[in-house]
Image (cartoon, grey):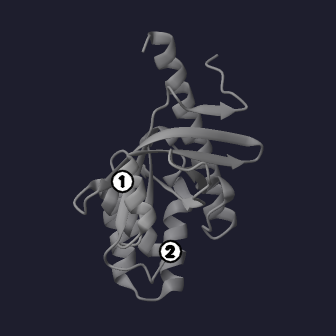
Amino acid sequence: MNETEKSQSQVLENYFLGWQCRIRQQAVRNDEGRPSEGMMADLYVSISERNLGPLVTNVVLKDSAEITSEFRHVVRKTHDPKLRRESALKILSSAYYQYPKNFAGALIATFAVESELADLLVAQQECKLVFHQYNQTFELHCSVTELNETDDNFQATYWHNRMFNATLPARVRIIEFAPDWSKSVADPAVNAA
């Protein structure tokens, strides 16, 4: 990849993360954290042209250990789902999504242990995620990796989701989608200038 392609890929990644942070911040501030359209991807794998989504995704901080500890504390301090949600919204609506550069470029999704879709994704090792909201669309070509429970992104995602979902099982599968920004596109396109 030449310098121009690297620059264009970086611009697209930065723009996407900024867009994700804005719509997520809006969701926690105005809609009690309910996933908006842009937080859910249409999912396509190479063996099917059928949309297998919507797939609710998370974004995680590059350095997530401290916030994961805070998420875990929220979950463990009360069994009341309403109090958990209120605490989660307080954390996430403040400065959490304020700095897109603090987020890793990967997207994360949670699946049931027996999920056939998770099996398919892991077997295919790649997929396409299509996000759209407010006349903006992103088509991301991603590699797929199943995370183990000791992975920081697994822990951050699990405890984030437990704050909002009191019925989330103790055992889940968490899959990371790493976009290949050189193959991904935005519509309308993002300019490097």
Please say if 19 is above or below 68: above
Name which quarter of the figure residue 51 lies in: bottom right
The residue to which callout 1 is attached is 122
Q: Residue furthest right?
A: 135
Position of 71 compared to 10: left or right? left
Q: Is residue 180 left or right of residue 40?
A: left
- Residue located beneath label 2 in the image: 164
Residue lying at the far left of the rendered structure: 150
Question: How many neighbours does mark 2 have within 10 angstroms: few (below 14), some (14-19), or many (20 or more)?
Answer: many
The three-letter code of the residue at mark 2 reads Phe
Please name the residue shown 63% across and 39% down the image. 138
Q: Residues under labels 2 and 1: Cα distance?
A: 26 Å
Count of numbered marks:
2
Q: Quadrant of the N terminus?
A: top left
* Residue 26 % position (x, y): 66, 57
Q: Is residue 44 above or below residue 139?
A: below
Res. 74 image quadrant = bottom left
Q: Earlier in the sequence, mark 2 or mark 1?
A: 1
Amino acid of disc 1: Val
Q: Position of residue 180 (x, y in %)?
A: 46, 33
Seen from this angle, which residue lies furthest bottom?
80
Q: Can the viewer see residue 61 in this picture? A: no
Say which of 70 and 42 sits in front: 42
Q: Give the residue displayed 28% in from the left and 55% down from the top.
A: 152
Asked if the residues shown at circle 2 and circle 1 are in contact, with their CB atoms under 8 angstroms apart, the answer is: no
| Left or right of 141 on screen, residue 155 | left
Any part of residue 165 in sight = yes
Rendered image quadrant of residue 151: bottom left
